[in-house]
Image (tube, helix red, strand yellow):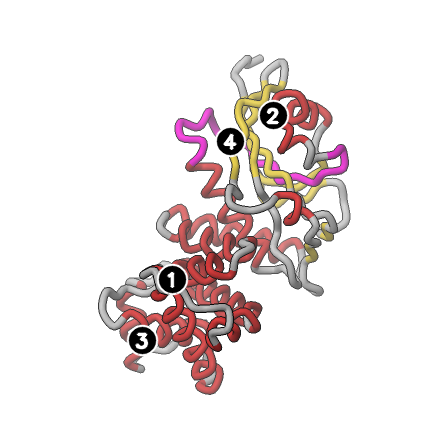
Amino acid sequence: MSNASQYYLVFPILNKGLTLFRGPVWLINENTNIQTITADDLSNFTYEADSIYNNLLSNNSRCIYITLDKNPENPIDIIKSYSSILKFTFNSYTDKNPIIISFAGLFRSNRKTKLVSVYDLESDTNYYNLKKLGYRVKTKITKDEISKYFSIVYKVCSKNKSLIITLEKFNSARTRTMLFDKILDLSTSLESLIPSQTEVTFKFSLYNSFFAFDEPEKRKEAYKLLHDLYELRSKIIHGVPPTDTDNKLVNIKDNLDEYYKITLKAINYRIYYESLDLNKTWDEHIKSLIIGTESKVI
């Protein structure tokens, strides 16, 4: 019998009202599942971690467990990558609120289970306020759909690691408390999808409206929203933020759900395109798409 240590990650889901699927364990893939936290792991969080973490957990806490092949050399990079992919996957299927995964534990198991370290994933947010948010999967969505999409996102991000930032900025926009932070995060996420250093506001608005929608009228509406978003992003970045009564700022605040929808659709299109492993690069595809010599692949 091998005495080699096994390593695994635990991502507690903090949403107070959490509605997923029936059953004690949801096997997402061979290395990943969702289950109630084990007694040993809860004990480790309680006695080995800072009180800010263990006070958020109970013996009924649902967690995402990921088994690792070996002791990770750079655990924070692996944890952040998994966190971004997990949160984005579940945020793609929420009926309203974001999934709340604010920290993760790295565990080592041999004869005894030991908490190696805890990693903060929501450093700029209020854990306890976020914990009040419920989470429910959209109606008519199945376990298999979510599991399949998680695998697709994981595969694409394994090949193109720059997309991790794209996903994480979208995720963080969903949990930020300050509107300016939401604007910056959404803009960064969407800007990462376009290959441009010139006429950025125009291309940011045009390209992402194309990614998100097929109908010309919806693209026109999305273009206007995105143009306002990037314009305010530039003002914030350059130290001349809009006032609370600025019409564009008020409009963004009133249409946040639509901004989330546009951003999610644009990112999902990028992921779907890259999952097809076509001969044409993403940048080449964008140019052909805008010119009209090529259609969207979905």
Query: Element type at marker 2?
Result: loop
> Badge 4 local density, few (<14 within 10 Å), some, or many (20+)?
some
Disc 2 designates what residue?
49
Observer-side mark, 4 or 2, equals 2
Q: Earlier in the sequence, mark 3 or mark 2?
A: 2
Amino acid carrying label 2: it is: Ala
Instruction: Please tell me which residue lies in front, 221 or 35.
Output: 221
Amino acid carrying label 4: it is: Leu
Q: Is residue 60 magenta?
A: yes
- Is there a contact, CB below 8 Å, between mark 4 and mark 1? no
The number of numbered discs placed on residues in the rendered structure image is 4
Q: Earlier in the sequence, mark 2 or mark 1?
A: 2
Q: Which residues are magenta?
A: 58-76
> Badge 1 local density, few (<14 within 10 Å), some, or many (20+)?
some
Disc 3 designates what residue?
202
Q: Is residue 109 above or below residue 121?
A: above
Residue 115 in view (yes/no): yes
> Badge 2 local density, few (<14 within 10 Å), some, or many (20+)?
some
